[in-house]
Amino acid sequence: MSRNLNYKLSAGTTPGFIGAKLQPAAGPLVGSVAKRALVACSMITGSGGSVNYNAFRTYKWTGINGGYQYNKTPKSHISAHLTRNIPEGANIGMLDSHVEWKPFRQFLPRALGLNGGPYFYY
């Protein structure tokens, strides 16, 4: 999703299309770099895509197979900051270099599981 791309540390817009070509800073204005995420704690689930808090609670947040393998064997992943196997929230590092805590209820799917892959939330 283009809303998740940061082409510059100082950019206040997302990439957008001009004609058929994706251009940096041609998309919608997203505001201050103090509100734009650069890095986040890993929140990963094998099923997902919902933005509904009650649906989040039914997802599996541990034992998720991703792309990492050791000796050709997939290694499972676990989401950060779990309480009773549900994420409490995440630390989000913003473009202006500050870090803030974001509660679990505010998570959005940011990278969708393609070809049966995991979903990432922050």
Image: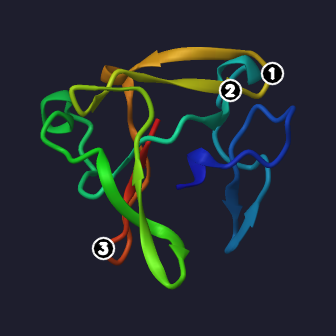
Q: Quadrant of residue 61?
A: top left
The local secondary structure at tag 3 comes to: loop
Q: Nearer the viewer, residue 33 or 15?
A: 33
Q: Residues within 10 Å of mark 3 (few under 14, many from 20)?
A: few
The local secondary structure at tag 1 comes to: loop
Looking at the image, residue 90 lies above or below residue 9: above
Marks 2 & 1, CB-CB < 8 Å contact: yes
Left/right placement of residue 31 relative to residue 117 reads right
Looking at the image, residue 7 lies above or below residue 13: below
- Name the residue located 77 percent from the left edge and 28 percent from the top edge: 95
**Could you tell me the amino acid type at mark 1?**
Ser
Label 2 and label 1: CA atoms lie apart by 6 Å
The local secondary structure at tag 2 comes to: strand
Label 3 and label 2: CA atoms lie apart by 28 Å
The residue most toward the front is 71
First along the sequence among labels 3 and 2 = 2
User: Which residue is the site of mark 1?
Assistant: 97
User: Which residue is the site of mark 3?
Assistant: 116
Left/right placement of residue 96 relative to residue 93 reads right
Q: Nearer the viewer, residue 88 or 116?
A: 88
- Name the residue located 65 percent from the left edge and 20 percent from the top edge: 35
